[in-house]
Amino acid sequence: MAIEVVPEQLYALAGVLDAASTPADRVAAALPGDPVGGPLGGAVTAFGEAAGAAGRCLAGELRWLGGAVAAAADSWLGLDGGLLPVPGRGVAR
């Protein structure tokens, strides 16, 4: 099976993935680091720490995936450029 995706679409996807990392970073930054009192304090603090770690991990993965998609588009463009004939030169038959 072949999937045809033009490099411009891959660059657009890479941009969307990179942009999606910003809200994930905000999740981690928005959670208070101060301990919460009361009988549920420990559970609330642990939940905040876990949610913050998940936000940071998700943001990092989205940035990495965006970079990988952009690198694939770069590679495809390089391959296409190597396969196309150069104007003014003959093409082997």
Image: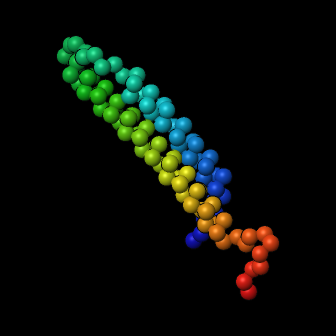
**In the figure, residue 75 lies in which quadrant?**
bottom right
Report x, y in % for residue 78.
Answer: 61, 62
In this rendering, the answer to whether 53 lies above or below 61 is: above
Q: Residue lying furthest front in this view?
A: 88
In this rendering, the answer to whether 63 lies above or below 55 is: below
**In the figure, residue 88 lies in which quadrant?**
bottom right
| Horizontal side of residue 91 vs 81, given as left or right | right
8 and 38: which is toward the camera: 8
Which residue occupies 66% across, 71% down?
83
In this rendering, the answer to whether 79 lies above or below 71 is: below
| Horizontal side of residue 80 vs 62, given as left or right | right
Report x, y in % for residue 26.
Answer: 44, 27
Q: Residue lying furthest top in this view?
A: 37
| Quadrant where the N terminus is found in the figure | bottom right
**In the figure, residue 7 lies in which quadrant?**
bottom right
| Quadrant where the C terminus is found in the figure | bottom right
In this rendering, the answer to whether 38 lies above or below 17 is: above
Report x, y in % for residue 71.
Answer: 53, 54
57 and 87: which is toward the camera: 87
Which residue occupies 33% across, 34% down?
53
Question: What number of labels is visible?
Answer: 0
Q: Residue lying furthest bottom in this view?
A: 93
Which residue occupies 64% across, 69% down?
82
The colour scheme of the drawn protein is rainbow
Which residue occupies 56% across, 47% down?
14
